[in-house]
Amino acid sequence: MKSSLVLLMAGSGTRSGLEINKVLYQINQTPLFMYSLNKFHQVGFDEYILVVSKNDYDYILTDGKYAQDSINLIKNNPGAISIIDAGRWDNGVLKVCDNVDYIICSQEFANNVSGIKITDDYANNVLVYNKLKVRFPRAKGIAITIGKKGYIFEKDNEVLVNPSFDSGISSIDTNCAGDIFHAGFTHALANGFDYY
């Protein structure tokens, strides 16, 4: 027997006095609905259905962990700009990539999808980038993060590498560096800044 979880997320927050959808209210920097979703995920439902109001979101940043939920959220908010942190390569993430406006992917993801390994050779990396563009024609923009070397992107039909910023500070732990990059990218889009 198939089990489904339906999580109602379509409120506006007017009755709670929050002026935002109460499930988006954050406790310890985590939206309230994520606590429920994580607990229910431990139960192991076959399907997760998030019921949201259309046009609740201006921007959607996902990592594709819950692929179908991400796709549903994007489809229910057609006016929202959608971005994926494609750090890993699996069928769910590929399906989400087929539905988003912007793909920020890891070098590993780009290598696997293109079938070509990113190197220091510019022509090779242009080939990798162009294969991603062909594979994900819906995407308005693609960026490939390449660790300490920065990221590969396209501006005015030219594939470029934007080098990372050398702060002169030795890093001890780069955990969450990618998350900060994705948040900064989304912030730039939301504020009309160039993301390159």
Image (tube, rainbow, N blue to C red):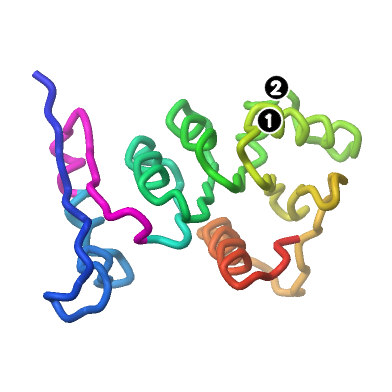
Which corner quadrant of the image does residue 18 belong to?
bottom left
Tag of residue 139: none
Q: Is residue 101 magenta?
A: no
Q: Nearer the viewer, residue 186 or 144?
A: 186
Q: What's the magenta region?
A: 39-56
For the point 90% across and 39% down, which residue is it? 122
Residue 125 left/right relative to 52 = right
Q: Nearer the viewer, residue 11 or 1?
A: 11
Q: Amino acid at mark 1?
A: Asn
- Would you place residue 116 above or below residue 180 in this image? above
Q: Secondary structure at mark 1?
A: helix
Q: Nearer the viewer, residue 115 or 133?
A: 133
Residue 192 location in percent, x, y?
A: 65, 70
- Would you place residue 122 above or below residue 78 in this image? above
Q: Secondary structure at mark 2?
A: loop
Q: Is residue 48 magenta?
A: yes
Q: Amino acid at mark 2?
A: Gly
Single out the residue that lies furthest toward the bottom: 17
Tag of residue 111: 1
Residue 190 location in percent, x, y?
A: 56, 68
Residue 10 left/right relative to 187 = left
Q: Residues within 10 Å of mark 2 (few under 14, many from 20)?
A: few
Quadrant where the C terminus is found in the figure:
bottom right
- Would you place residue 136 above or below residue 51 in this image? above
Residue 93 location in percent, x, y?
A: 48, 34
- Would you place residue 190 above or below residue 158 in this image? below
For the point 20% across and 72% down, which residue is it? 13
Rounded to the nearest angstrom, the CA distance separating label 2 from label 1 is 6 Å
| Residue picked out by circle 2 | 115
Tell me, yes or no, whether the two marked residues, 2 and 1, touch with CB atoms within 8 Å: yes
Quadrant where the N terminus is found in the figure:
top left
